[in-house]
């Protein structure tokens, strides 16, 4: 999602378009339009991913279990809160995937717009910059960007490590 959103928001902010757009009635709705475009593209990409995943998964022949309950007679297996069938369980996974995808798109939009606004256009490397005023640290914008990068890398490495250790 960030790849789709970055050029639009960055170009507008760096060219001071956002401030110019406030002078017209339609210009005030630009950020909302960008937000709706992000949600629509996130939904479309999620649906495409799910269609591909469901298409690949349907070749495994698990459709015969669609109406079977997910509970089992084995004691050492997970105990579920709800009495679901396999089909209901799959539909819940699909619903949660869509909700998480849209939620992450919204989070990326808000964080990206705030970060671009704070780091790129709000008195970068100036004493009057928001981050400089809050922290009192010279060049805090660079350290913030490095911090975001490190956090993202650590989260990716942890996820890859966790998935490697996960038993199927």
Image (cartoon, grey):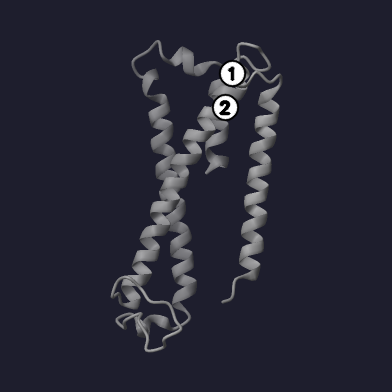
Read off the residue under disc 1: 121
Sequence-wise first label, 2 or 1:
2
**Label 2 neighbour load within 10 Å: few <14, some 14-19, many 20+:** some
Residue 25 sits above or below residue 143 on the image: above
Q: Considering depth in this image, is 104 or 14 the residue closer to the camera?
A: 104
Residue 101 sits above or below residue 67 on the image: above
Read off the residue under disc 2: 116
**Residue 109 percent across, percent down from the top left:** 48, 36
Q: Considering depth in this image, is 93 or 161 the residue closer to the camera?
A: 161
Residue 2 sits above or below residue 83 on the image: above
**Label 1 neighbour load within 10 Å: few <14, some 14-19, many 20+:** some
Say which element carries label 2. helix
Cα distance in 3D space between marks 2 and 1: 7 Å
Q: Considering depth in this image, is 135 or 26 the residue closer to the camera?
A: 135
**Residue 108 percent across, percent down from the top left:** 50, 40
Which residue is painted at 41% across and 47% down in the image?
A: 102
Q: Which mark is residue 48?
A: none
Position of the C terminus, as image quadrant, is bottom right
Which residue is painted at 58% across and 20% down in the image?
A: 134
**Residue 38 percent across, percent down from the top left:** 44, 40
> In the picture provided, is 16 more to the left or to the right than 106?
right
């Amino acid at each position: 999602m960030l790849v789709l959103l970055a050029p639009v928001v960055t170009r507008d902010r760096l060219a001071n378009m956002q401030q110019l757009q406030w002078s017209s009635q339609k210009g005030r709705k630009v950020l909302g339009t960008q937000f709706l475009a992000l949600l629509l593209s996130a939904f479309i990409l999620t649906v495409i991913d799910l269609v591909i995943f469901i298409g690949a998964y349907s070749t495994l022949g698990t459709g015969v279990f669609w109406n079977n309950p997910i509970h089992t007679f084995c004691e050492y297996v997970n105990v579920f809160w709800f009495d679901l069938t396999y089909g209901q369980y799959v539909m819940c996974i699909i619903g949660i995937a869509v909700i998480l995808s849209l939620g992450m798109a919204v989070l990326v939009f808000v964080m990206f717009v705030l970060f671009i606004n704070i780091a790129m256009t709000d008195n970068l490397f100036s004493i009057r910059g928001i981050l400089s005023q809050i922290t009192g640290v010279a060049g805090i914008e660079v350290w913030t960007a490095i911090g975001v990068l490190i956090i993202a890398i650590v989260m990716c490495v942890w996820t890859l490590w966790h998935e490697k250790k996960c038993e199927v």
